Amino acid sequence: MTYFTRPAVVGTITKNVKENVKTGKENGADILELRFDLLLTNTIGFEKYLKKDFEETALIDQMKEWIKEAKDSGLPVIGTLRSKEEGGAFEGKESDRFDLIKKILPDVDYVDIERKSSKKNIYKCRRIAEKSNTKIILSSHYFDEKDMPSLKKIESVLEKSFEKGADIAKVAVMPETKKDVLKLYQAGLRSKKPERICLIAMGDLGKQTRVLAPFYGSILSYGYMDEEAAPGQLPVGKIKEGFKLFGLL
């Protein structure tokens, strides 16, 4: 398994796939993330799929079409179907969500799955991923400032992610103070697997981490093309400029 040798900028796409694939590549994205939960809700004919029964075949065909459009850029692709509980738009059954994830998993280079997902679902995805050489990102999100984890907790979450089969462990937090941001940096510095972690602080306080976290071990930084997919995201081009300014490239 080959991991990153330098920080990578991830361009998150939530709508207008063809247009934003082009924009992402032009602005220096190293990887493209397809946020399927948001793409489907922003697409006529699929916008209500989360709240009623849906035709799985039609959804899968559409998702695979987007993957092809993204892969035509020559860039690696992350597939994400985020649950509402962790900041996404998918409100349906967990079994339905994972049925969709498993169907598109072999077609993407990375798949982002919530760490809190059941061991059974993660295991099934792991088995498919091993056959297709797809890497698994296990992510944990703390959107409430009051739920800001301690340094010890962040380290524990990273370790548990690897224990559950993560190729890359991702932790995103909402800091309440500058000291909270420092906790994230400390966790990165102390990590034994710096080439395999992604650390993000959201909101205004966390904007700096989009550029600076790689100094402390984080290997991925998520940016946007036309609209934020998470609080505090910066445009892909700005992150790339920051990387160049600080000698990260």
Image: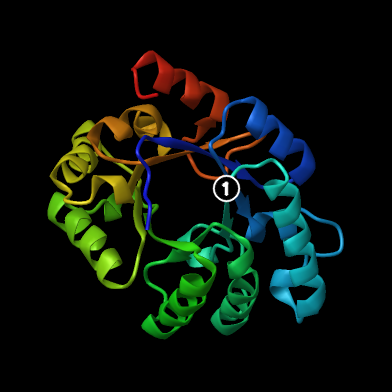
Which one is in front, 24 or 74? 74
Which one is in front, 26 or 96? 26
Vertical comparison of 187 with 227: above or below: below
- Residue 199 position, x and y percent, is 32, 45
- Residue 66 position, x and y percent, is 74, 55
Which one is in front, 171 or 71? 71
The residue that mark 1 highlights is: 76
- Identify the image's colour scheme: rainbow, by chain, secondary structure or one colour: rainbow
Q: Residues within 10 Å of mark 1 (few under 14, many from 20)?
A: some
* Residue in the image at 17% along x and 49% along y: 191
Indicate the secondary structure of the residue bearing disc 1. Answer: loop
Q: Quadrant of the C terminus?
A: top left
* Residue in the image at 47% along x and 26% along y: 239
Q: How many marks?
A: 1
- Residue 81 position, x and y percent, is 59, 63
Vertical comparison of 137 with 235: above or below: below
* Residue in the image at 76% along x and 82% along y: 53
Q: Quadrant of the N terminus?
A: bottom left
- Residue 183 position, x and y percent, is 18, 42
Quadrant of residue 246 within the rendered picture: top left
Q: Is residue 235 visible?
A: yes
* Residue in the image at 34% along x and 18% along y: 247
Q: Is residue 54 visible?
A: no
Vertical comparison of 152 with 188: above or below: below
Three-letter code, disc 1: Pro
